[in-house]
Amino acid sequence: MRRTLALAVIAITLCVNVGGCSTPVDTGSSIPAQSQPIYTVLALLGLGIAITAFHHHSESHPGGSQKVPQTPISVIPLRTTNASPIDLTLDPLQAGQFGALLAGTAGAATVFDLGDTSSGTVTPEYTLPSGYKPTALAIDGGTAHEEWFVNPSGIVDGCAIGPTTCLPSPAPFSDTLAVGGTRYVAADSQHVFIARDDGSTTITWAAFDFAANLVGNGSYTYTAGVGKGLYPKDAVVANGTSISQFLFFHQDGTSHEVQLTSPPATGLGPTMTPVPTNIGNATIAGVDIFAYTGSPTSGLYSIARYDAGGTDPLAFTIMAQTLVAFNGVPNPPIGNPFTVPLTNVHADGAGVYGLDPAGRVVTFNVF
């Protein structure tokens, strides 16, 4: 835009001071020939300003007014024939690639697929063992580079990327946590990490190496009440791949962290203000936390980027946000519709991702 402005100024200056700009642009125009180039440049300049204004309306900062939803860089449908998407995760070793867990319907088996946002494709990977119905998924950043699953009973499976059938390695094992509650799985370059929210006041967790050896476990409590527990999906994430730290995001905007030191240490994590909406989840990418804000039911729905902008390193506020829907209407790419609300928010260097109700992975530019 700066270059356009500079060229416009130069053109206007030349046309004012040099007599060579008298050739008519439009011989049928009522504007004098010597003035037509100036009017043409001004019109183009106005178009450039309008385009720039549209772009800035799609991304806003705290306190700004944004009414034009951002257009995603990709909308990728998952396979939904006899399958229903239930979880989404990112590949920590390959930005722009994601894994999807799909529960079988009509008697079909649970399956795992890999997707690539740069090509817009989804590749069916494998079917999980018969009768195994996991509810959460993670991909590790280790040399084996496996997917990890946990089911409601606490049975953990690890499967290598590539074959058309999951051959668990190590053999399926118990996460050692109590039955019931909601389970989550996360992984870094050395550990698979299982957490359980009892739905009341207590979080328990257990960490294993990739040979299924228990390397640490623990628990913490939170205040009882509606909206105090962990998000229903993807609430436990690895903070990077190499520092052995895991974050637990609660629906009230608070979080806890576990550091796999010897012995493991549990402490408070970042607190997000304002509190994100509780229909999705929160996640961390680098030093930024991404979460959904607004309300799809009221028509205004955004993804916010939180960061520590003050003296308190655990006080996270909104630094920028991108509008997903206005008056309940998103702004999809031509021929690639999607709907809100989005869930399963994730982020990496290639984009910010969400899963829509119809099983489409929606990716926005990082902001």
Image (spheres, grey):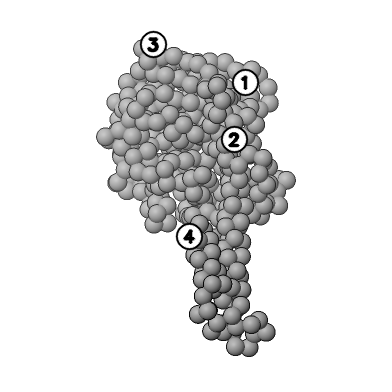
Residue in front for this viewpoint, 351 or 354:
351
Q: Residue furthest top?
A: 263
* Image location of residue 330, percent across then percent down: 62, 54
Residue 239's disc is none
SS state under label 1? loop
The mark that comes first in sequence, 3 or 1, is 1
Q: Earlier in the sequence, mark 3 or mark 4?
A: 4
Cα–Cα span, label 3 and label 2 = 34 Å
Q: In this view, does 314 lie above or below 84?
A: above
Task: Please rate how many residues cluster around mark 4, counting C-alpha atoms within 10 Å: few if below 14, some from 14 to 19, many from 20.
Answer: few
Q: Residue 33: in sight, yes or no?
A: yes
Q: Mark 3 points at which residue?
A: 263
Q: Which of marks 1 and 2 is in front?
A: 2
- Residue at image x 48%, y 60%? 3
Whichever of callouts 4 and 1 sits on the residue coming sooner in the sequence is 4
Kind of residue at disc 1? Ser
Q: Distance between the residues labelled 4 and 1?
A: 59 Å
First in residue order: circle 1 vs circle 2: 1
Give whichever of discs 3 and 2 has the lower sequence position: 3
Contact (Cβ within 8 Å) of mark 3 with mark 4: no
Q: What residue type is labelled 4?
A: Arg
Q: Is residue 50 above or below residue 56?
A: below
Q: In this view, does 340 lie above or below 170?
A: below
Q: Looking at numbered disc 3 in the image, what kind of residue is underneath it?
A: Pro
Residue under circle 4?
Answer: 3
Residue bearing the label numbered 1: 200
